[in-house]
Image (cartoon, coloured by chain):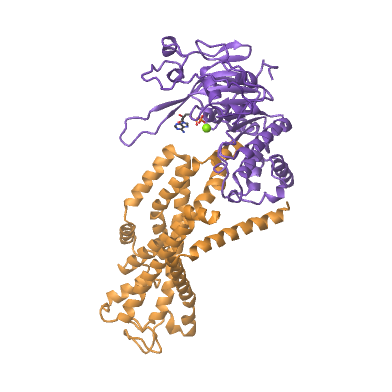
Amino acid sequence: MAEGRHNPLLELRDIRKTYRTRRSLFGSGGREVVALNSVSLEIYHGEIFGLVGESGSGKTTVGRLIVRLEDPEQGSIRLEGVEVTKLRGKALRDFRRKVQMIFQDPYQSLNPQLSVFDTVSEPLTVHRIGNSSQREEQVRKALTAAGLSPPEDYVFRYPHQLSGGQRQRVAIARAMVLKPSFIVADEPTSMLDASISAQIFNILIEMREKLDATLLFITHSLAAARYLCDRIAVIYKGNLMEIGSADEIIQNPIHPYTRALLDALPRFGDCGEMKYYGTLLGREREYVEPSACPFFPRCRPADETKCSRDKPLLKEIFPSHFVACFEPDLKQAEGSGGDTCFYGT
Amino acid sequence: MELATKKIVLRYHWVFRIREGWGIFHQSLLGKIGLVLLLLFALMALCSYIPPRLDPMYDPMTGVDPKISHSTGPSMRHWLGTDFMGRDILSQLLAGARIAFMVGVSAAFMSIFLGTAIGMIAGYVGRIMDTLLMRLADMIMVMPTLLVVLILSSLFGQLNIWTIVLIIALFRWPGVSRVIRSQTLSLKQRPFIEAARVAGASHLRIIFRHIMPNVLPLSFLYMTFRVTSAIIIEAALAFLGFGDPGTVSWGMMLQWVWKTGHMFKAPYWLLPPGICISLITLSFYMLGRAMDEVLDPRLRREQEAG
Ligand SMILES: Nc1ncnc2c1ncn2[C@@H]1O[C@H](COP(=O)(O)OP(=O)(O)O)[C@@H](O)[C@H]1O
Ligand SMILES: [Mg+2]
């Protein structure tokens, strides 16, 4: 996927997004929450790009900005070189045909009053694609591809007659039915059982092949990202900490936060002398300058003077491997970590 | 996936939901009493067409018994007696049921229609539109409807029954619109609305396809309460002498009792319309309470799980 570096399919440049929390009855004004702070990303055609971070780190916000559910305060988003944030009218409608999203909570993302058929055919209806029998055919295909077969068994059902996994498949079918070129999948399995998660992952992989689509896969689990993604970006409190190929991020993580995320994963198999980085501070630092590195309060290897004063920028430390850290520790942790050792989600 | 099959199944879906709703409704004693009472009143309204056909003297408005020119008690000829000029009270009572349904249901329907539309627009569009519409709602809400109609009728003389219905509707939407607005506000945040936006749905489509079906049950619930208030307002107006002189409503009957000084002399004339007004408003109220339970999502979820 490293090829064709020159023109990414999707490009985020210096995105900033803040939310103003609602002001209280007598409060003078709302507090500002910085959800994303100068985020830049490039996603290339055909890849599955993973965005990993703990909850509240701004992952969903990235997805919502990309599908134009929200607009950034600052920065630009380009799809195929076209600025997305300013699209209106017909251009916006064409954009909506190309970019789709799978939402985190399948219990919330389907209208309880609409049947599966109505839900999945809605994008086709809205964009006036095909006649009714062609639409039926498209819906049938999308449902089958999303693992709901035979589709006849599902089209007339309502969300309350479906399990969580089935609902998420319906949501996937709705996202696929327009044959979009870019899909945002926002933690599509976080509400589902592990066994169903694996099936959903495989459907996403098939979908990429079938539609020749590009995916942004949002997850809180590095292990899931490794399984699914070609490249991974790690985000912490609205700041990108590390970007690299999935294998690099897992086998050669540099940023203390990425290392802490790996440490936190459960491990299975023959792990021998387990590899632990121990980069997380037991007790958070208090009274931190606002200008400090966002991870400074929790970072064990941090440099007390440098890291507490400035925020590091992303630097290319290895080819195509970017890290935002002043003092990257290039040595990997000791431990053989046998070949059969793997991380679980 | 024949389209014909689809339609049948969708219709089946509604049958299923209604049956499910009925299952909950059925457990409510209030609801059952209310429904039975309402059916009785509906029967009365239907029967109101019978007496005038039997004999012109049973016409509730113009039919005067040639032999009687004052109020008399119940007899074989007039089961509930006659009013001050010899008109049959039972015929008037039956006609009153018809008027009550007409006034109640049409005023409620119009005010619910207005309230739902305005509430959805305010909630969905938000910002300045929301502020304007809700200030308007506040202003109308603090005006007592009865007083407004009284003032209007003293300005323009006797009001026609349909004008009264229209005024009630125009002054009774704010309560509903507030409820529908807040429901719309919370629906607007739900991911399925965002999913529709991502799919490319227009605002109109989102309002009609995604929000309206989810607020309509609530609108219908409010409709039963609006029926109650419309009937009471009309009755009060009529009793105070500002009703439509061309209709026989229960309020009008009470006004005649009062005006002709039979208030304490003719219980057979005073009680039936009084009891009917109380019972019909009570039964719509009970129906509304039972429907409230049917629509309560917590109860519904339990039913689904079970
Ligand atoms: N609508 C909103 N209003 C206020 N704050 C928000 C809103 N949406 C997100 N946030 C804040 O922005 C930050 C990032 O949120 P989000 O993108 O949902 O994180 P994630 O998906 O990684 O859990 C959080 O601190 C969250 O509280
Ligand atoms: Mg999220």
The residue nearer to you, when weighing A54 against B125, is A54
Q: Residue at x 46, y 47 (%)?
A: B183
Where A70 sits versus A114, above or below?
A: above
Quarter of the picture holding the N terminus of chain A? top right
Question: Where does the image place residue B217, in percent across and percent down from the top left?
Answer: 50, 55
Residue B159 or B226: which is nearer the viewer?
B226
Q: Kindly tell me whether residue A255 is visible in this rendering.
A: yes
Where is the C terminus of chain A found, in terms of image quarters?
top right
In the picture, measured across the screen, residue B153 lies left or right of residue A145, that is left
Q: Colour of chain B?
A: orange
Q: Is residue B13 left or right of residue B246?
A: right
> Residue at the location (73% across, 33% down)?
A210
Name the one closer to the observer, A280 or A287.
A280
**Can you say whether A275 is above or below B266 in the image?**
above
Q: Residue B50 in the image: x percent, y percent?
A: 49, 80
Residue A85 sits above or below residue B86 on the image: above
Residue at position x 43%, y 27% in the image: A33
Residue B198 image position (x, y, % from top left): 59, 36
Q: Position of residue A75 (x, y in %)?
A: 52, 20
Looking at the picture, tell me which residue is in the foreground, B40 or A140. A140
Q: Colour of chain A?
A: purple
Is residue B204 depicted above or below B258 in this figure?
above
- Residue B61 in sight from this viewpoint: no
Q: Please report the residue visible at 42 percent of the width from the left and 66 percent of the height from the top.
A: B30
Name the quadrant containing residue B270.
bottom left
